Image (cartoon, grey):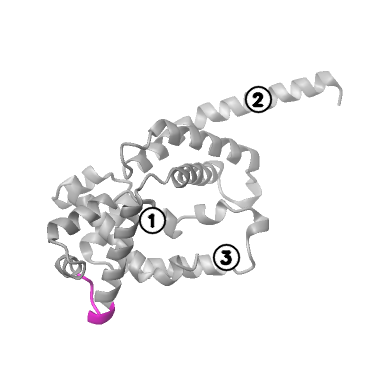
């Protein structure tokens, strides 16, 4: 290929890339603002959008239509994965938040193993030697902690799609499916209100304020319920999460 042909080819590729970025910029922003709704103010939405754009370009470079998924579906996974990677790198949460979240999960596990039923707020608070107000404050502090991220539990395909084919072991696919089945079973076993919050948040794409309007509680209370649901799942799925 001569220099002129290479130049024309590069121009065509750059034009296609620019058109693709323009077409899917709204998708990047939509995913960024959805993720932001669970994060503290110190995380900047512009940083997520920038990471999402990198994910979009990677999707454009690596997309294979022969795999069956549409480009938008594939791009959405790569965009979300790039944003989550950015959040993980920053890991804004203080160590004390991580430590308290683990303590709550352990308390939930202890109570549920001994009682054979869902751990209740006042029981967990008592186990932790906290007032109910202190317990709710702990849940509020943990609401955006990456330790409790639904995606970090492997609920989406980001966990696998972020790996290269060479990094995937022969049992990864089976383990992923078994985990997702266990996760689905545990979600069905959550208390009604916690299950409803997760459904409205992750399946219906409502934000915390909108969920509060649906179930008749404040946005901060929805945040607490959301955290408690994830902590309960973390407690019940500890053998999967700790082995990751």
Please report the residue visible at 50 percent of the width from the left and 52 percent of the height from the top: 158
* Magenta stretch holds residue 9: no
Q: Nearer the viewer, mark 1 or mark 3?
A: 1
**What's the distance in space between the residues labelled 1 and 2, CA to CA?**
39 Å
* Residue 222 or residue 131, whichever sits in front: 131
Q: Is residue 163 above or below residue 28?
A: below
x and y, in percent, of residue 33 in the image: 36, 37
Q: Secondary structure at mark 1?
A: helix
* Residue 63 or residue 83, whichever sits in front: 83
Q: Is residue 107 above or below residue 226?
A: below
- 3 relative position to 73: left or right: right
Give residue 147's mark: 1
- First in residue order: circle 2 vs circle 3: 2
**What's the distance in space between the residues labelled 1 and 3, CA to CA?**
23 Å
Give residue 173's mark: 3
Residue bearing the label numbered 2: 14
Mark 1 Cα-neighbour bin, 10 Å: few <14, some 14–19, many ≥20? many
* Residue 48 or residue 105, whichever sits in front: 105
- 80 relative position to 20: left or right: left
Magenta span: 113-119
Q: Secondary structure at mark 2?
A: helix
Residue 187 visible from this viewpoint: no
């Amino acid at each position: 290929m001569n220099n002129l042909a290479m130049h024309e080819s590069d121009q065509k590729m750059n034009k296609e890339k620019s058109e693709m970025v323009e077409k899917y910029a709204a998708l990047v922003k939509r995913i960024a603002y959805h993720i932001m709704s669970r994060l503290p103010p110190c995380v900047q939405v512009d940083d997520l959008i920038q990471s999402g754009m990198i994910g979009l370009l990677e999707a454009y470079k690596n997309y294979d239509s022969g795999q069956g998924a549409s480009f938008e579906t594939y791009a959405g996974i790569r965009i979300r994965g790039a944003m989550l990677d950015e959040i993980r790198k920053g890991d804004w949460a203080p160590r004390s938040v991580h430590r308290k979240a683990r303590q709550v999960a352990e308390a939930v596990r202890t109570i549920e193993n001994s009682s054979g039923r869902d751990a209740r707020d006042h029981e967990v608070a008592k186990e932790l030697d906290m007032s109910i107000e202190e317990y709710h404050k702990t849940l509020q502090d943990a609401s955006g902690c990456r330790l409790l991220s639904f995606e970090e539990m492997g609920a989406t395909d980001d966990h696998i799609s972020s790996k290269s084919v060479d990094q995937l072991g022969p049992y990864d696919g089976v383990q992923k499916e078994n985990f997702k089945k266990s996760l689905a079973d545990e979600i069905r076993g959550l208390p009604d209100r916690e299950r409803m919050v997760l459904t409205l948040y992750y399946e219906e794409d409502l934000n915390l304020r909108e969920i509060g309007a649906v179930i008749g509680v404040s946005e901060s209370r929805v945040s607490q319920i959301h955290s408690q649901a994830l902590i309960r799942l973390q407690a019940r799925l500890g053998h999967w999460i700790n082995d990751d």
